[in-house]
Image: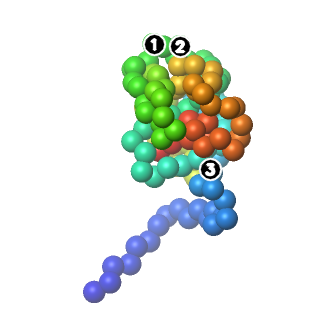
Amino acid sequence: MPTQLSFEHHFSYSLFSTGITLSVVLSSSDMMIRTKANVDTGAEFCVFTYDVGIGLGLDIESGIPMEMGPAGGGVVETFGHEVNLQTLDVSFDSIISISSKPKFPSQQSTANDPIRCAARFVC
């Protein structure tokens, strides 16, 4: 017998775009930042750029140290911080990783760069 799934929230996205992009709001203490985010449903971590951490007023290097190995090669040092994440009318607390450097090694800083986009939000 087939099982029918029902969902409280629905989100439509373009089949012609690369990836799924959402608007997100991150908050920590009394600081808040809005950003666009690319979603990777298979990712183990939420990784954001250094600029997002600064915008939240975080002392980036005081977080939980982690090293990431992006698909493009190399190592990206990040630090984990607990924040509140809001998207699609859902709000939850999460530990996100913030890049320790303003730019990733050997990466151009362009909106179409998949490593930079993934670094904004990968969950």
Percent across and percent down for residue 18 are 63, 56
Report the residue marked by disc 1: 62
- Residue for point 52% across, 38% down: 72
- Residue for point 45% across, 13% down: 62
Pointer 2 local density, CA inside 10 Å: few below 14, some 14–19, many at least 20: few
Percent across and percent down for residue 94 are 44, 35
Comparing 33 with 67, the one in front is 67
Q: Residue furthest right?
A: 110
- Residue for point 60% across, 27% down: 106
Pointer 3 local density, CA inside 10 Å: few below 14, some 14–19, many at least 20: some
Q: Amino acid at mark 3?
A: Leu
Give the left or right position of residue 98, taking residue 109 as reference.
left
Q: Amino acid at mark 2?
A: Asp
Quadrant where the N terminus is found in the figure: bottom left
Q: Amino acid at mark 1?
A: Ser
For numbered disc 1, what is the local secondary structure?
helix
Cα–Cα span, label 3 and label 1: 28 Å
Percent across and percent down for residue 47 are 50, 34
Label placed on residue 22: 3
Comparing 44 with 62, the one in front is 44
Label placed on residue 59: 2
Pointer 1 local density, CA inside 10 Å: few below 14, some 14–19, many at least 20: few
Residue 103 picture quarter: top right
Residue 120 picture quarter: top right
Tell me: residue 102, above or below residue 7.
above
Label placed on residue 84: none
Cα–Cα span, label 1 and label 2: 6 Å
For numbered disc 2, what is the local secondary structure?
loop
Query: Answer yes or no: do the residues labelled 1 and 2 have beta carbons within 8 Å?
Result: yes
Q: Is residue 25 visible?
A: no
3 or 1: tag closer to the N-terminus: 3
